[in-house]
Image: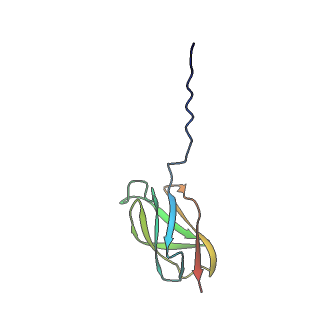
Amino acid sequence: MIRLLVLVAACAETTGPHLTSAMPAAASVNAVVTVAGERMCAGDCLHAAGMFDLGSARASVVALTDTSAQITIPALAPAGKTSIILTVNDSTSNALAFEVLP
């Protein structure tokens, strides 16, 4: 008797940045927000070309590691619900829910 064992592995995207949380989850313009995640500077934080976007406005990066970033909410960010999206070296993260307070 021959038995065949087939293992099926789940495929998961593990190459680009992934955002997990923002603290606080809502903030006013010019506030500093800490964003947590994975692969946020593609393993090379000294040379990564990362950009955090909130809708149509780009946030300034205060500090960046591969698992955490501090960003400043830009003056051009419109008030209301939006998403934070990180692009690093042409790889885009998931959209992380965020709210810009008036």
Residue 35 image position (x, y, % from top left): 47, 68
Q: Which residue ends up furthest to the top in the rendered image?
A: 1
- Side of 64 where 14 appears, left or right: right
| The one of 56 and 80 positioned closer to us in this rendering | 80
Q: Residue at x 62, y 82 (%)?
A: 79
Q: Residue at x 51, y 73 (%)?
A: 59
Q: Which residue ends up furthest to the front in the rendered image?
A: 1
Q: Residue at x 59, y 77 (%)?
A: 99
Q: Which residue ends up furthest to the left in the rendered image?
A: 46
Q: Is residue 49 above or below residue 60?
A: above
* Image quarter (top left, top right, bottom left or bottom right) of the C terminus: bottom right
Q: Which residue ends up furthest to the bottom in the rendered image?
A: 102
Q: Residue at x 56, y 15 (%)?
A: 2
Residue 74 image position (x, y, % from top left): 52, 79
Image colouring: rainbow
Q: Quadrant of residue 66?
A: bottom left
Q: Is residue 28 above or below residue 89?
A: below
Residue 29 image position (x, y, % from top left): 53, 83
Count of all numbered marks drawn on residues in the image: 0
Residue 50 image position (x, y, % from top left): 47, 62
* Image quarter (top left, top right, bottom left or bottom right) of the N terminus: top right
